[in-house]
Image (cartoon, rainbow, N blue to C red):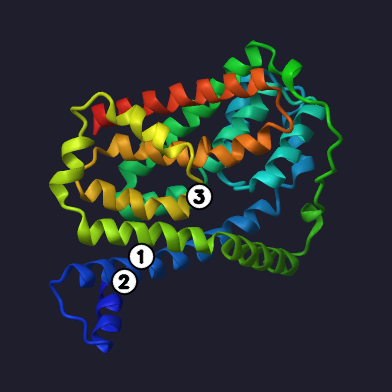
Amino acid sequence: MFEKIAQIILGLFSFSRGTRLYSSLEFFIADIIKIFLLLTIIIFVVSIIRSYLPPDRIRKFLAGKNSIFSSVVAALIGIITPFCSCSAIPLFLGFIEAGVPVGATFSFLIASPMVNEVALILLLSMFGLKIALIYAGLGLLIAIISGLILGKIGAEKWIINIETRELAHKTGQMAFKMRLIYAKNYTENIVKNVWIYIVIGVGIGAVVHGYVPVDYLSSIASKNHWYAVPAAVLLGVPLYSNAAGIIPLISVLTEKGVAIGTVLAFMMAVTGLSFPEFMILKKVLRWQLLAIFIAIVTVGIIAAGYLFNAII
């Protein structure tokens, strides 16, 4: 459907079919329409669900629970709470102050950007249910195991004690009409903040789609090359994007023959191990904990990439 819309638009401007430029523009227009439509609907619906789960209620629910239970629940909560870094870190510290096991706070911090509802819906629309479910399972496993390891080593001793602002939203007491307004405002804010990354991501994907030969990428990043997964993870670290911005590029890379596990490891690294995130976390984590956090998550993502390549 979206490709048909793109073809109609290009037809209005008399672009010739069969050229590389036409192929790139068709991909760009179709994906821009599809992603913004899905993004708007998904975030609006999930925002209404989120309005029933204010941070103070989450903290109270997790406080005092055992480490395995709290890490699993915190990782699952991360799926429907796609907080940006500026709000995730105060919530992260709020969890600790409320007595939530430190491992659970890291499970949330890892799962929230890596395995959120936007990523899952877009993966579902582009790759199907099987890939989306495996990605979600592996992402949650990384978040849970990483949290448990960090909890076992007593990571709280390396957290910088800074004053945090209270995030106890009163969304739990809203009338449904107010929840709709809250969801509308939140959706507008998210789209306003991420649209440029989506356009850049789709733009890069469109260029690769139209101009990069299939054999070129498949020859250097196939599942037969052991170095492809760790190289993809290292490449993803200095980049900054969210799932909506990176998935169009992921789609094109798989189309060009790059192994699915390799590109999904790249996606996990971009969303869960980005350099800008490290700069923010450096303000609240001592270097020892930041280094351990990066090492554990990196190893988990690389292992997930190899596993994905093995089973798909």
Which residue shows up at 86% across the image and 35% down it? 163
Q: How many marks?
A: 3
| Up/down of 228 relative to 118, above or below | above
Which quadrant would the C terminus be assigned to in this image? top left
Residue that carries the numbered disc 1 in the rendered image: 31
The answer for how far apart the CA atoms under marks 1 and 2 are is 7 Å
**Crowding at label 3, few (<14), some or many (≥20) Cα neighbours within 10 Å?**
many
Q: Amino acid at mark 3?
A: Asn
Q: Is residue 221 or residue 127 the one in the foreground?
A: 221
- Which circle marks residue 242 in the picture? 3
Q: Amino acid at mark 2?
A: Phe
Residue that carries the numbered disc 2 in the rendered image: 2
Q: Is residue 109 or residue 240 the one in the foreground?
A: 240
Q: Is residue 140 or residue 236 the one in the foreground?
A: 236
Which residue shows up at 45% across the image and 55% down it? 245
| Up/down of 76 relative to 307, above or below | below
First of labels 1, 2 by sequence position: 2
Q: Is residue 33 left or right of residue 159?
A: left
Which residue shows up at 22% across the image and 50% down it? 255
| Up/down of 240 relative to 28, above or below | above
Q: Is residue 297 left or right of residue 265?
A: right
Residue 219 in which image quadrant: top left
Q: Are marks 1 and 2 in contact (CB under 8 Å)?
A: yes
Q: Position of residue 232 (x, y in %)?
A: 35, 35
